[in-house]
Each structure stands twice: as C-alpha cells, then as structure tokens.
Image: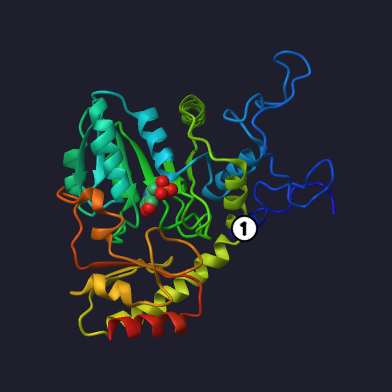
Amino acid sequence: MTDQEPPRDAFATRAVHAGLTPDPSFRSVIPAIHQTSTYAQRRPGEFVGDYDYARTANPTRTALEQAIGDLEGGLAVVFASGLAAEHAVITAVCGAGSHMVLPADLYGGTFRLVDKVLSGWGLDYDLVDQTDLAALERAVGANTKLIWVESPTNPSLNLIDIEGVIARRRDALVAVDNTFATPANQRPLERGADIVVHSTTKYLGGHSDVVGGAVITRRPELHERMRFVQNAVGAVPGPFDCFLVHRGLRTLHLRMDAHARSASAIVELLRAMPEVRDVRWPGFSGMVSFHHPRAASVATRTRLFTLAESLGGVESLIEVPQLMTHQSVEGSDAAVPADLVRLSCGVEDPDDLVADLRQALA
Ligand SMILES: Cc1ncc(COP(=O)(O)O)c(C=O)c1O
C-alpha cells in the first residue's frame, strides 16, 4: 500500500477513510489521540501549523474536522456540543439589532438559546412554520441576517424545502441543522445552504457516549470567523471526544441504513394500532413520531426502547417531548402537544423492536 490518499468518490468510502492517515511515527492505522493542552516550541513563536495551544487547535480535532467537512462537502469546525456550535454560528453571523428566523417546530434548546440568552443581547427573532414558504417570505426583512432551518424538524419530522427557503432569503444566510438527516441522507451545502450545523452527539457519534457539535460551510471567510469565535469563546471538544465522534463516523452509512430498516418496521406496526394517530417518518433515518392519548404511559412501558432524551445512538430510545426535550418551549408558539411520542429507532433486530412497542401499546 502506498501513502497516497485512497479513492474517495463514494460516500461509504469517504465515511471509512476521511480524515485518517496512518500515524507518521509508528504507522498505527489509527492516529494517536493527542491528549495535550500545549505544544513544545523550539524557539519563541516557532510551532507546527497553528498548534500553539490546544484551545486553538489539536490534531485529533483537526482529523475530525477534515472527516466531517469531507462528508458534508465543506470546511468544518467542531465544538463541545451542538448548542455550542449553534451559539458560535448565531453570534458570528448576528449582532445586536439583527433579526433571525427560527422554525416554529424546532429543538427546544435552540429556542431557549435565542429566546432566553441571545435576545437579551439585542437579537430579535420570529418563529415561522417553514412548510409555508409564503409565511417565511413575509418574515424575512431587511435586518434578517440568519434563517435557521431544521429538516426534518424536531420533534414533528416535517421536511423543509431547502431550495425554497434559499430562494426567499434576501440578504440572510441560511443555516441548516442536519442532525436528524445526517450527510448520509441530505447534504444542504450541495443544495445552496450557507451553513450546516450538527449535534454530533446524535447520529454522527452514533453510540450515545459523547456530546459534541459541528459547523460546516463552503465560505472560507465564514470558516475563519467560526474558528476565531471558537478560539475566542473556548467551547472546544476534548481530544478523546473527537476520537469517539470520528470512530462513529466510520460506520455512519451502515448505521443509517439499519436505523431506517428499524423505523420502517415500527411505522408499519404503528399505522395498524388503534389509538395511534399521525405517524410520521421522513422515509430515512430512525426518527419516528406519533400521537397517543396515553403518551407518558406508553413511554414507561417499553423494555427495549429506553426512556431517555437524545437520539441517534445504536440503541432505541423513546421520549415524550413535552415533558422531556421540549420543556423549554412550553408556553411559547413552538410548544409541542402532550400526546406526542418521539422514537429514535436503533439498530437492534427490527422484530424485537416491533414486539417491544406492541406490548407497550397493548
Ligand atoms: C436537532 C438538534 N439540534 C441541536 C441539538 C443540541 O445538541 P447538543 O445536545 O449536542 O448540544 C439537539 C439536541 O438534542 C438536537 O436534537
């Protein structure tokens, strides 16, 4: 084998190889985890690349950034959490007096960040049902600097017409939270979006053992600005967390196929159950939602689906958004109904998952 880069055309090949070159010292196939806070300088100011201090840069983080950038088709910066990534994007793009458009159906933490933290610094926002492009167009004004898109949305799993949003953006940048879809299913930068955001805690990490975030863009000046904000604010992920996300990425394509197989079997069951209504699944990934009059009781009766917040790991999770992930939107226009149940279908045997949910619904 030569040291040349392997062919990177297909997504699966890139998922396995992106960001990974054998360690130059010992030829270990997986490079060492650079668990360090600083780097020895030969003379004052003389260091390798931008590796002077580990808040600024770390090789394990760089490797993950290369991999995520490769899969999304842009330049990536990774963060300590999805919300840290969101905070960096919003504060890099918006300032006091700016206006932002948020989806009316969105992750509760995103709403809390804007409504409870950033609005105190002068950021104005509107919640808009982005399945209604005319409403979106009306909400975008001269001060609108950023349109935030989730597709599929969390928790209602609506798909948004990303090109339709871009066509109505005026001078605003369009950021897409691609956490639910992942680049295995949807690559917003290829469709004209300016920014992609991830909670890598979810499908990219894929094993419910790490919290992280990422921002990806094709605009070099925005990438530089993100790196600047990251270093200035300091919400960096640790090297071991970067390693874990990177390891997860290598099976993303396989896991996403298996998640979809599980979700498809679960949806078939749900559509046949008497008290279940409005079953939603975007047709890819493992996220399914439905309404049930006794949502909380169903969620406490599963044995294989663990009652827990979060999503995207290999194990199946069940939750009631109103009582769990979306408490921060209670009382706002983004509030979610009490009878909504959200599933993150894992990669267990679909028959076992179906049997578990059937007994919980019985
Ligand atoms: C769609 C979406 N975006 C962002 C986040 C925030 O990510 P994190 O929990 O890694 O901060 C979440 C968390 O659940 C999410 O579901």
- In which quadrant of the rendered view does residue 88 lie? top left
Q: Position of residue 142 (x, y in %)?
A: 22, 28
- In which quadrant of the rendered view does residue 93 lie? top left
Describe residue 275's horizontal placement relative to residue 62 as left or right: left
Q: Quadrant of the C terminus?
A: bottom left
Res 194 seen here: no
Q: Position of residue 186 (x, y in %)?
A: 45, 56
Describe residue 252's horizontal placement relative to residue 138 as left or right: right
The residue under label 1 is 250
In the image, residue 143 above or below residue 73: above
Disc 1 marks which amino acid?
Answer: Arg
In the image, residue 8 above or below residue 47: below
Callout 1 secondary element: loop
Q: What is the tally of numbered marks visible in this picture?
A: 1
- Depth check: give the residue in front, 275 or 167: 275
Describe residue 121's horizontal placement relative to residue 355 as left or right: left
Measuring 54% from the left and 40% from the top, which residue is drawn there? 237
Res 27 seen here: yes
- In which quadrant of the rendered view does residue 301 lie? bottom left
Measuring 39% from the left and 39% from the top, which residue is drawn there? 86
Q: Quadrant of the N terminus?
A: bottom right
Q: Position of residue 325 (x, y in %)?
A: 31, 55
Measuring 68% from the left and 53% from the top, which residue is drawn there? 17
Describe residue 73's horizontal placement relative to residue 41 as left or right: left
Measuring 46% from the left and 30% from the top, which residue is drawn there? 222
Q: Position of residue 260 (x, y in %)?
A: 45, 71
- Depth check: give the residue in front, 213 or 160: 213
